[in-house]
Image (cartoon, rainbow, N blue to C red):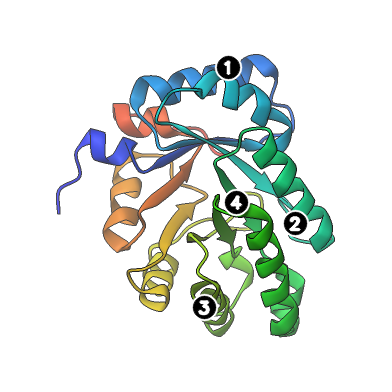
Amino acid sequence: MPYDTKTIAAAIDHTLLKPEARPGDIDILCEEALKHGFAAVCVNSLWIPKVAQRLSGSAVAPCSVVGFPLGASLTASVADEARQAIDAGAQEIDMVISVGEVLAGNWDSVRQGIDTVLRACGDVSLKVILETCLLDEAQKRQSCEICRELDVAFVKTSTGFSSGGATIEDVRLMRETVGAELGVKASGGIRDRATAVAMLEAGANRLGCSAGVAIVTGGEGDAGY
């Protein structure tokens, strides 16, 4: 199907997760999201009060990452970060799966970790970042199946901070595994319109991008979140 600029923009989580991000950078991020009609502004939890205030009354959702970017925090800490972010105005939460537990095949621990954060989110949408570049196909599928069974809102490819980002193959695999019920968010390395459209055509319905403005204006963004 054809994707016009408005449709692409409405799928973008406009993202800034760099540790050197300053208050003024967050202000610009919000202004850009409002101007172009992006789905969300995705930031570290520190910035959620500022983002929530700036986006108040708009259709753009404040989104916080938690347990980011390693997926190696205590589950209780991740759940508490999610609760505090929501209290500060986050309308969506992106958590990192416990990558080490996935690699070890400790699926009960993986499930418990996701479920604990999901319960902390209440009615707020939870996206689960798999960090697909570190997993084999079976691990990706099993992680997606757990997310489908728990009924999270989205499965997401990547943090953008590891050895690779979203690929067409991973997006297709994730969509195939979760079916039509869950969202699929492609993130990491999406820096131009052609790549964004390719991810949507592969089955993504949300795109995590630091290059959202370049994507919708026909340019190409810089690397990194």
Q: Nearer the viewer, mark 4 or mark 2?
A: 4
Closer to the camera, 88 or 17?
88
Q: Read off the residue under disc 3.
A: 149
Instruction: Of the two numbered discs 2 and 1 on the same chain, state the one appearing first in sequence.
Output: 1
Label 1 to label 3: alpha-carbon separation:
38 Å
Q: From what the image shows, is residue 23 above or below residue 59?
A: above
Q: Residue at x 74, y 83 (%)?
A: 106
Image quarter (top left, top right, bottom left or bottom right) of the N terminus: bottom left
Q: Could you tell whether 68 is left or right of 169 in the image?
A: right
Q: How packed is label 4: few (under 14 Cα within 10 Å), some, or many (20 or more)?
A: many
Any mark on residue 27, and which? 1
Q: Note whether residue 135 is visible.
A: yes
Q: Position of residue 166 (x, y in %)?
A: 48, 57
Q: How packed is label 1: few (under 14 Cα within 10 Å), some, or many (20 or more)?
A: some
Instruction: Of the two numbered discs 3 and 2 on the same chain, state the one appearing first in sequence.
Output: 2
Closer to the camera, 72 or 166?
72
Q: Amino acid at mark 4?
A: Asp
Any mark on residue 70, and which? 2
Q: Amino acid at mark 3?
A: Glu
Mark 1: which secondary structure? helix
Discs 3, 2 touching: Cβ within 8 Å = no
